[in-house]
Every structure is written in structure tokens, then in C-alpha cells.
Amino acid sequence: MNPEFNEQTDKFNVPEPSSIRSAGQLSCGIGFLADFWKEKYLQEFIRDGGSKIKFVTGRPGSGKTHFLRLLCSMAEKENYKVVRFSAKNIWMHDFKEIYVEIFRQCRILTCLEAISRHLIEEMGFSGDDIPEGMKFIDYLSQNGSGDAITKREIRSQLRHVFLDNSLLDNNFALACSMLTGSILGYPVLEEQNRDLLLAWLEGDRTVKLSQLRALDFYPSRITKYNARHMLRSLAELVRMGGYSGLFVAVDDLEILTSRSSLEPVHYTKMKREDTYESIRQLIDDIDSMRNLLFVYAFDRELMDNENAGLKSYQALWMRIQNEVAGERFNRFADMVDLDRLAAQEYTSDVILSISRSLASLTSSLSMSPIDEATAREILLQARTGSLGIPQLIQNAMQEVKDNV
């Protein structure tokens, strides 16, 4: 797939990276920020138990989507559970919908299996000694160790791992304890009950709470009011499953101000303000969470639109407005302006390097590298134009090819 500009989405499209190497091929210039985030956040602050919300903005074609892809690749390499989605596909005004999407992409059974292996080791056994397909309790019984004392120890370990963890919601912890028990083979959990617990964790509205009460489980439904608390539990579960943390990337947030009837979702004034309030609440709650990095990306329209953009919701704007000020680009800032980054870091040499990288990514001769004179012209155009430097580079490369 060749890089191209999508006129409907105003996106700087490059091939979806399958590895950190392929994403890194277009990291010229943007690496100034991405490498910094990798070191200070992915390798240190978030991994050490911190949590953070970041915002990425810029003109159309400034490389926001590619920056998210690059960060996702870096996070995967640093052993993070990575979740990525577009605000064009998920309703943002109800945080429950966001939690559900994150939960679906996390595949928590993988985390619970890792936790069960840790629990087995805590009891003095090795998971490698258990034949594939055999549950832990069956292995114990086969070796004459499946007595009441050992079963009590399993229950004790499950209680310690889940119910004694203050970062886990009690109902979330109990559900995960029962699911981990089913992986171990004790306490026994029938398959239909296992599916019920997973459906409740996923916020399935069709689950009848009366069915869960039969399991001595008395939860309330997951709603927009408790979804952030459930997200905190999910992030902790991901850490317990052996990951460095949870990385969530949300693209296309400018959909909030779109009036196009072609968009899959359309936000009324009320839904838009509910979205801003949801983000405001997440900002206020983020310090109570651990090992979580949340990144929202959006076009500058969301910043500049006085009537429908971020400035229209004072409670949210008050929490992020100070991040916009400053003479030089601050890599610690929570509001990241890719246009300001480009103005500071993109020299003619960087632009030429990006051009060569783009050309090398094409599978045919559809794009040709530019020369130094064109690179200098792009720097001048970027000062007043409506497109970001990466898109200007691509447009220029296409013109070179057309003239050949």
C-alpha cells in the first residue's frame, strides 16, 4: 500500500506499521518527541506506576495519525498492552463505550492465564510441569496433592491476589478471581457462568443480574458513572498480567465539531459537552490510576473553534489551557502541537530525509524524492499554509513524479 492523502479524512496515510522498524522509517523529526516519550514515559514514569493523559494536535497532514502509530509500536516493544481506536467509530460522550472498547482489545483471559501461572509458582509448583490442556487441580489430584488443604490454599491465593488489591473494584476483582479459578480448575466454574462473567465485565446490557446472583455475585451494571473506576481496575489487571502498563491511543477527536452527514457518528451540542465532561473527569481521576497512558489526537479545528471546540467547555479548557503557552516546544507538555514541533525541529535536511523514507516505503515508483530547493520552499509554505509539513512533503513528491 502506497502512502496517500485521504481527502475525506484529511489524514497523512502511510502503510500501517507491522513493527517498530517499519514505523521508525518515518520517524525523522518526530523522533525528537517520540524517543523522549519512550524514555521518560514508557520506560520510566508509566512503567513505574504513574498515569498520564496527553493531547496531540496539529494541522491536517501534520502527522498525528502516524505519530500515534509510532507510539503504539514503541509501546508494544516495551511490553505494553496497546489499545488504539478512532473517535469516528466509538461514541465518546459515554465513557462506558470507551471502557468497553478498551476491554475488548485487552483480551483479559491472556492476563488471567499469566496470573494463574504466577499463582501456581507461589504455591511451589511450576507451570511447565503441567501437561498442556490439563488444569492445575487435575495435576494436583494426579500427584496426590488435591486435598482440602491445598484447595484452601488456592482460595487463599485468589483472595490475596484479587480481593486484597485496593486498586481493583471489588466486583471486578471477584469476577476475575472466579475466572482465574476456572483456569486453575478450582473453584469449579461452568462454561456458561464463565461466559456470563466475561459478558458482565464487557458491559453487556443483556446480562441479567439475577443470573449472576446465582453465583453469589451481586454486582451493579457498568455505566458511564463507574466506567473510569473499572478502567483503573483493568489497567491494574494488565499490570498483574505481566505487562508494563496500558497504552490507549484515540485518534480523530475533531469529529466532535464535524457537521458532515457522511460521518458515521454525529455529535449534538449535548453529546459534545458530555464528551468534554468525560475527558475532564478522566483528567481529574488520572492520578488515582496506575500504569496507564492515554493519548487523544485531533486536528487544530478542535482548538480553534470557539463555539464547539475545547474552549467552549470551560471546565475542561481550564485544565489544559496552560499547556498551550510557551516560547519553545516543551517535550513534557501534555498538549503537544506537532506544527510547533515541526517549526522548531524540521530543517531542510530533515525534510529531505523524510522524503527519502517515504520514497523507500512505496512498492512502486509512485513517489520521487525532492531536492533541497523544494525542501526550503516547503519550510516557507508551512509558515502560513493550511497543511502540515509531512503532507506538504508528500504533495511535492507527487509533483516531482508527475513531472518526470
Image: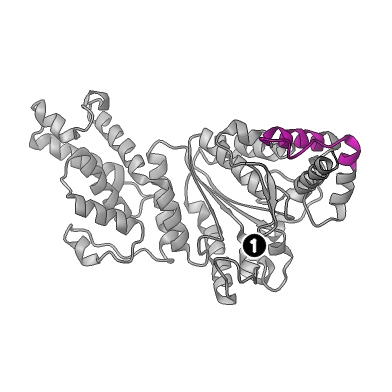
Question: Disc 1 marks which residue?
Answer: 254
Relative to residue 240, is residue 257 depicted above or below? below
Overall secondary structure of the magenta section: helix
**120 or 97: which is nearer to us?**
97
Residue 132, above or below 17 = above
Residue 76 seen: yes
- x and y percent of residue 311 in the render? 69, 68
Residue 46, position in %: x, y?
53, 41
Q: Residue at x 56, y 42 (%)?
A: 72
Image-quadrant location for residue 370: top right
| Residue ID at (78%, 37%) | 368
Label 1 element class: helix
Magenta segment: does it hold 302? Answer: no
Residue 118: quarter of image: top left
**Three-letter code, disc 1:** Glu
Going by the image, does 328 lie left or right of 140? right
Comparing 396 with 236, the one in front is: 396
**Magenta region:** 350-376
116 left or right of 364 in image: left
Q: Quadrant of the C terminus?
A: top right
